[in-house]
Amino acid sequence: MKVLIIGSGGREHALLWALKKSPMLTELYITPGRPAMKNLGILVDINIHNSMDIIQFCKREDIELVIIGPEQPIINGLADDLAAEGINVFAPNQAAAKLEASKSFTKELCKQYGIPTAKYERFIDETLAKNFVKSNRMKFPLVVKANGIAAGKGVIICNTEDEAFSAIDTMLVEKKFGESGEEIIIEEFLVGEEVSFFALIDGLKVATFGYAKDYKRSDENNEGQNTGGMGSYSSPSIISKDMEQKIIQRIIHPTIQALANMGTPYRGILFAGLMICKDGPKLLEYNVRFGDPEAQSILIRLDSNCDLLKLILSVAEGNLDTKKIELSDKSAVCIVVASKGYPGDYKKGEVIKGLDKIEAMPDVLVFHAGTQLDASGNWISDGGRVLNIVAEGNTIEEAKSKAYSALNFLEWPGGFFRYDIGS
Ligand code: AMP
Ligand code: GLY
């Protein structure tokens, strides 16, 4: 089977690595990809925001399945365009992708179907939003969120009225998030343990794919700015079977049923950002794709008998076999190495050494999120999040210790990473 993957980050590198093992695979393409992915797939240069270009390529090369990594092409409707041409695609349609594209869509759906989530109000008017804050109907801290996608930056936790007013101004007055912040949500602050939960969905059937913890802030102890994710770990012990059942029954199932009722069934992987609270799991947000860097620590745990390509194809074709997913009992840790300065300004083009030594270590993998090759064949930095060091172990501690030992070989003074991933 000929497969095309769309994307160029660490998540896509991990997907290539996992799919490459499939006996069903004949040819694997990636666009735009990165030089580090060349040993796993054929790099092709297509504008991923132009459906016609992708369709033409798929037809010319007889691509039988397209897997879309990042959210933007999904939200733009690429899955709809491919499906209209009869090309199998692993990603939801544009209407179902509103689960990620519009927080107010998701919140309303939760209200209508009784899905547990933080209490909220929606606003487009600055004065009404501020009056609501002043009314004290919602206690501090409270959370101000941009309705649309904002690269993980559209969520502001406010401890005081001043902070809430400033968050409201940022979104509704200064329009810092553009269209994404034209509507805002003010919601209750939930206390609990956060988990990223992933389910495969073929329209109606649901199967847990795995879960992970993600570290969103740039610095240790969850200080510093919000980032795309500075690391993750995945382990069978994160949640109990009983909690998993509650998540599926109270959150995932009703959501999938709601979308099916709307005539826009969900097909693909659904990523639920959850808070496990004293009174059960509550939905923080949905994403309509694999998480990055969660995918990296989950995919390394896929059992060798589990053919990821077969699984993904069954979702795309609407006949998911829910018993086919098997993760090992091991734990995995993924540490993101980023350019100093990220998520603010940072330098590019710095030489990175030592990756060969890291790759030679047992149970350790390197996925590239933002590198290029220079004319002399050196790896150079080419983004904010640059490398993912992923290690597997019998326990989280063991995986963590392997990943951090591997980082001792890294020679890149311009890079930084958090020392507490997996803690
Ligand atoms: P989101 O993009 O909605 O996942 O929000 C980003 C991060 O903000 C989440 O991963 C949480 O850590 C935090 N967050 C969002 N909403 C809430 C909430 N209602 N209560 C507590 N923390 C929240
Ligand atoms: N790690 C969070 C995300 O992929 O959005």
Image (spheres, rainbow, N blue to C red):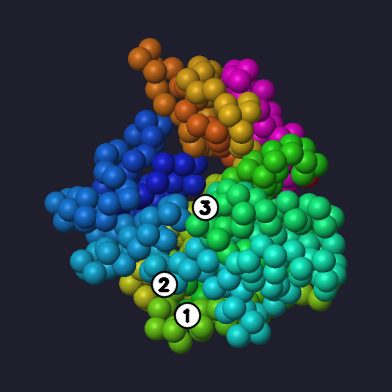
Marks 2/3 in contact by CB < 8 Å: the verdict is no
Query: Which one is in front in this view, the residue at disc 1 or the one at disc 3?
Result: 3
Q: To which residue does mark 1 refer? A: 259
Is 382 situated left or right of 286 in this image? left
Earlier sequence position, callout 2 versus callout 3 = 2
- What mark, if any, has residue 95 been given in the picture? 2
Q: Work out whether mark 2 precedes mark 1 in sequence or the reverse, and give the earlier one.
A: 2
Residue 178: mark: 3
* Residue 90 % position (x, y): 38, 63
Tell me where residue 372 appears, x and y as whole percent.
42, 26
Q: CA distance from mark 1 to mark 3?
A: 27 Å
Q: Earlier in the sequence, mark 1 or mark 3?
A: 3
What distance separates the C-alpha of mark 2 from that of mark 1?
9 Å
Residue at the location (66% across, 35% down)? 403
Q: Are marks 2 and 1 in contact (CB under 8 Å)?
A: yes
Residue type for callout 2: Ala
Callout 3: SS: helix
Between 188 and 283, the one nearer to me in the picture = 188
* Res 132 → quadrant: bottom right
Quadrant of the image for the N terminus? bottom left
